[in-house]
Amino acid sequence: MQLRRRSLSSVELVRACLERADALAGLGAFITRTADTALADAALADERFARGVDGGPLQGIPVAVKDLFDVAGVPTTGGSRILARNVAARDAAVIERLRAAGAVLVGKTNLHEWAFGVTSQNPHFGPAKNPWGAARIPGGSSGGSAVAVAAGMSHMALGTDTGGSIRIPAALCGVVGLKPTYGRVSLRGAIPLSWTLDHAGPLARTVRDAALSLGALAGYDEGDPVSVDRPADDYASALDEGVRGLRVLVPSTHFFGEVDPDVERAVREAAATLASLGATIEERPLPHTELLRAAQRAIIGSDAAAFHRENLEGRPADYGADVLERLRAGAAIDGVELARAHRDRDVIRRDWTALLGRYDVVLTPTTPVPAPPRAGQDAVAAAARLTANTSPFNLTGLPAISVPCGFTAEGLPIGLQLAAGPWREAVLLRAAHAYERATEWHTRHPQT
């Protein structure tokens, strides 16, 4: 709004983000910075504002992009040694959409190698560190994107989410992270992890910013074989309608097992807040939760191993230890196990979608624990633990969002996860915004 009123210029905003990135370079948020082109694009945005030209909902806004997405003329590394010198020839579909919306790209963010992990302790480009405590992981795989937003290095960042890779770092870094319905945002021009589980979406400081970002990103792309030809909603228009009359399901199975006491307390209080705003809260089981872990593991592992087959055979030494371990485990999955996983996935998705015809929102903790320490972290074990609550919504393809809902006694952020039925992002964002507006957690920022 300040940009449109011209009380603040895009150049000033972008320069402030670049200066933050310089000052906090030790957090490891970026792999590649695009400062010169960002300032030039910001100056063009200011010229458009001066002429009264509407260049889109993100005109002049500094954004960062996970280094899985192609940006023409800029390296796309995937956080890997193998692609360290891979320069993109053209923009990914989401970069085309961001440019069309007027966004200013400030750089490409750090990630867990090949997006196959949740710690973002990258062995090739250095670790990403949590701005709430540099001795903690920021989550992953979109760790650098969450760090950039939380620490004020960008106002929005693009991430991918295969088992929780947007929502996990959003929760651990105290920002908003949105995974839309499978097929809602194009993946053309993004390095895949799992063709059947990958999603793209925004990380932002507020739900409104996430809604505006999704509005810019969403839409059919005939160049993406899994893109769905379904009209996108105006995600920001109904944000202020509140939650009165909405039906909220709190699962009594799976999602609250082995949860840190501070996390459970904060999430239960969030449910009470929504109830006080007029939502109906009901606790009941979600079906088939005993099938979730095995199905997710088989599908993500086999998909990843298929994509990496050539390099896994010819260049194994160029992978980090944890990613190599997970890829080899994926390659060992047999056809019978994979067929069973796909069948279980279909059953889970059918029955969850049917249940969400009677409920508007599912409410859970985003992660069972706050940000773990970086030192001595077993990346494979961390992936299993931190994706426990997020990966079910990749398996089913349902939209889900993480919003800040409190802090632990040690001052670490806690994330509230809300999910909804397919294509119901507008309802999901409306519920998240109502909670955000009733609380102040999103207004707290790390003292970095």
Image (cartoon, rainbow, N blue to C red):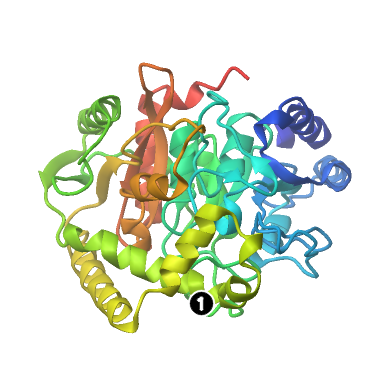
Q: Amino acid at mark 1?
A: Ala
Q: How many marks?
A: 1
- Residue at 12%, 43% in the rendered image: 283
Q: Position of residue 351 (x, y in %)?
A: 18, 67
Instruction: Please tell me in which quadrant of the rendered image residue 240 appears.
Output: top left
The quadrant in which the N terminus is found is top right
- 152 sits left or right of 373 in the view: right
Q: Position of residue 266 (x, y in %)?
A: 29, 27
Judge whether residue 120 can be spotted in this image.
yes
Judge whether residue 232 can be spotted in this image.
no
- Residue at 40%, 55% in the rendered image: 425
Q: Nearer the viewer, residue 197 or 304?
A: 304
Q: Secondary structure at mark 1?
A: helix
- Residue at 59%, 17% in the rendered image: 447
- 391 sits left or right of 356 in the view: right
- 133 sits left or right of 168 in the view: right
Q: Position of residue 334 (x, y in %)?
A: 34, 79
**Circle 1 crowding by C-alpha within 10 Å: few under 14, some 14–19, many from 20:** some
| 315 shown above or below 263 | below
Q: Which residue is mark 1?
A: 306
**Residue lying at the far front of the rendered structure:** 317
- Residue at 61%, 79% in the rendered image: 223
- 102 sits left or right of 123 in the view: right
Q: Position of residue 140 (x, y in %)?
A: 51, 46
| 411 shown above or below 15 | above
The quadrant in which the C terminus is found is top right
